[in-house]
Every structure is written in structure tokens, then in C-alpha cells.
């Protein structure tokens, strides 16, 4: 597997070197990677359990002080 084909699930911010490596890819490759990530996120948001969890922490009244 080449470095370009790896996908990572991380909560750690990418390093400057990681971001630079991404920007050095061709525009077609960057678009492919971003499209894959967008599809993964769309699937994640569509899951019923994830939707319920989001509603729990996003729900409720807005209280301003």
C-alpha cells in the first residue's frame, strides 16, 4: 500500500509536514481523497445511533445569560 492510499482516523491534528505532503499531491488525487472522506462522513452522519447521540448533545434549549 502506498502512502497515498492510507487512511487515518485520528483526533490528533496533522503536522505541517503531513499537510504539505497532501498539498504536493496532484489536484486529482487530492479531490479523490477528499471525496472518500466526504463519503465516510456522510455515512457516519446517516447512522441511526450517531444521529441519536448528536441529538442528545445538540438538543435542548439555548440559554443566554
Image (cartoon, rainbow, N blue to C red):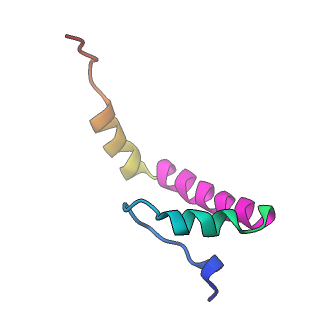
State the quadrant of the C terminus. Answer: top left
Q: Residue 3's x, y, as percent?
A: 61, 82
The image quadrant that residue 12 belongs to is bottom left
Q: Residue furthest bottom?
A: 1
Residue name at image x 40 percent, y 44 percent = 51
Q: In the visual, does 37 lie left or right of 59?
A: right
Q: Residue 49's x, y, as percent?
A: 36, 51
Residue name at image x 71 percent, y 62 percent = 30
Q: Residue furthest left?
A: 65
Q: Does residue 38 belong to the magenta stretch? A: yes
Q: In the visual, does 3 lie left or right of 57?
A: right
The image quadrant that residue 53 belongs to is top left
Residue name at image x 62 percent, y 70 percent = 21
Q: Nearer the viewer, residue 20 or 37?
A: 20
Q: Residue 44's x, y, as percent?
A: 48, 55
Q: Nearer the viewer, residue 9 or 15?
A: 15
Q: Nearer the viewer, residue 39 or 48?
A: 39
Range shown magenta = 28-46
Q: In the visual, does 45 lie left or right of 52?
A: right
State the quadrant of the N terminus. Answer: bottom right
Residue name at image x 23 percent, y 15 percent = 63
* Prevailing secondary structure of the magenta residues: helix
Amino acid at each position: 500500500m502506498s502512502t497515498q492510499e492510507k487512511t487515518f482516523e485520528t483526533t490528533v491534528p496533522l503536522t505541517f509536514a503531513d499537510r504539505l505532503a497532501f498539498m504536493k499531491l496532484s489536484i486529482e488525487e487530492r479531490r479523490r481523497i477528499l471525496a472518500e472522506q466526504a463519503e465516510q462522513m456522510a455515512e457516519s452522519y446517516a447512522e441511526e445511533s450517531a444521529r441519536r447521540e448528536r441529538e442528545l448533545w445538540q438538543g435542548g434549549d439555548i440559554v443566554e445569560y
